[in-house]
Amino acid sequence: MNVTSGDFAFIPLGGTGEIGLNLNVYRYDGALLAIDCGIGFGGAEHPEVEVMVPDPAWLAERRDRLAGLVITHAHEDHIGAVAALWRQLRCPVYGSPFVVAVLRRKLAEAGLLNEVKLHTIPLGGRFQVESFDLQFIRVTHSVPEAQSLVIRTRYGTVLHTGDWKLDPDPLIGEPADEAAFAKLGEEGVLAMICDSTNVMVEGHSGSEGEVRRSLTALLRQLKGRIAVTCFATNLARVESIAVAAQAAGRRVALFGRSLRNAEAAARECGYLTEAPEFVPEEEAAFVPDNELVIICTGSQGEPRSAMAKIAADTHPSIALGEGDTIIFSSRMIPGNERAILKMQDDLSRRGARIMTADDHMVHVSGHPARDELKRLYSLVKPKYAVPVHGEWRHLTEHAALARSLGATPVLVEDGDVLSLAPGKPDIVESVPVGKLAIDGDRLLPMEGGLLAARKRMLFNGVVIASLAVDQGGKVLGQPQLSAPGLFENGDNEPAQIAVDLGRAVGDLPVIVRREDDMLREAVRGILRKSVGKKLRKRPSVEVHLLRV
Ligand SMILES: [Zn+2]
Ligand SMILES: [Zn+2]
């Protein structure tokens, strides 16, 4: 069977078998539809990289068949790579009003606003993207306007849940549209492609309403300055902090660019109506300590965030320390633990008190725990279950749960082409996938030579030597050597190595000294040996050879 001519297939290119970097593709009789396009963090596994995006090469090669990109919600792991990858995809983009408001700001920053065709779809709207018959269903999550996507085809219906939970009191927006899920279940669902993040968590994920009540009680008891960090797009949380602050007789300032961007997008969409007017950042320092709450970016330890600057005591407009309280109203995204704990440590050393979700009710997850998963399966009653949005231990646990709830699980990972119909679901081929690092304005392959070299330099350092020789290979003047990151400034060791190098080159056979490549290689060998002996390291060695 020629699988591309007539079938309905799910092709995860990012986010299945890993955390973050969500990029999903559906293929319907040859036409392609992408869902979400997000970033991931380098974390401890890739210290040479801060932000990564999924490699879209396979999709980009087929972009003449790509009907569009639908965004389920405005989280970075679903929306953050659109600007970086759009030039390769060049397709229209669809999302809710808040998704479009957030995306518009990101595209404007990237100079792409006038190039991208953005389509705003009303909440719960049904719409057509070429041959794809689509419908959003409202869910709750830790960002407003999160939605699941229904894809109806002549082979059957798929529910792509996106990130969701069943919050009875989401504070912003309505609870999830369970009636729409029930109706879909009656209609018949071939497969549900579903969030696996919290499948290990028993019970219910809790509610934003509980967090608001708890923060309100907590802030009333505290003295000194209070800083709270949370995800910028968690508007219910931002509003809860603001409402709790007001109830405690405090004014609120927003610190950090992503919070200000989220606030602008929120006001544009009619959210944050309960929050009082925010104090401008520059004026926060003039508010008395007991009358101030700062809401900060940096809950994930991001190095340039407001909280990172406060922790390092380099923030231009505020300092926190003895007598102040810092609340982490967030969870740690896997991979960011070290950066976050280091930040918390720096803040405690300054004398500030740290509160987290481990010791206070200051956060609930945006993803479904087991009771919520059970509820959704009972409403939708999918024939097949495809766990996504998680690492393998989440996917396998989710598969076991789905089986116990009457669905047949199918496990896939990034790069698998899962043909859902006709016939039984089956992985029919695999396509190339990978990650790219965002490096300034460039996208670099993670497996490529550049980043591998940078990682080597990060751990082993780099030695750069320059030397001039005449046609016969006689060293002219004194070779120069620098080794940033290996020797202190002012250390005379590099100069000594350079002197030894000049002598060692003089001892090389004439045939080696006459030929540029051979001489360069020999110099490299000499330096590796001499530096290796002194430092017990194998640095990268660069040689600049000038033949005069
Ligand atoms: Zn997500
Ligand atoms: Zn999300």
Image: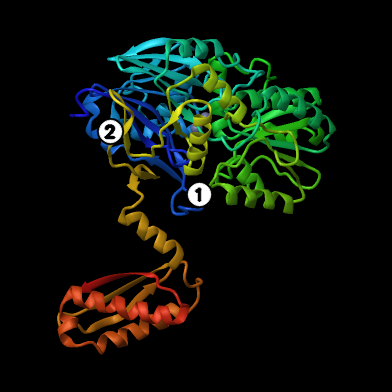
Mark 1 element type: loop
Q: Quadrant of residue 82?
A: top left
Q: Which of 50 and 277 is in front in this view?
A: 50
Q: Classify the position of the N terminus by image quarter.
A: top left
Which badge, 2 or 1, comes first in the chain's sequence?
Answer: 1
Question: Residue at point 62% right, 32% down?
Answer: 365
Residue 456 higher or lower than 217, as above or below: below
Label 2 neighbourhood size at 10 Å, few (<14), some (14-19), many (20+)? Answer: many
Residue closest to the far bottom: 507
Label tally: 2
Q: In which quarter of the image is residue 266?
A: top right
Image quadrant containing the C terminus? bottom left
Q: Position of residue 476 (x, y in %)?
A: 25, 81
Who's the residue at 68% across and 33% down the image? 363
Asked if residue 141 can be seen in this view, the reply is no
Q: Which residue is drawn at 29% across and 25% down?
A: 423
Mark 2 vs ligand 1: CB below 8 Å: no
Q: Is residue 114 visible?
A: yes
Which numbered dot is residue 476?
none
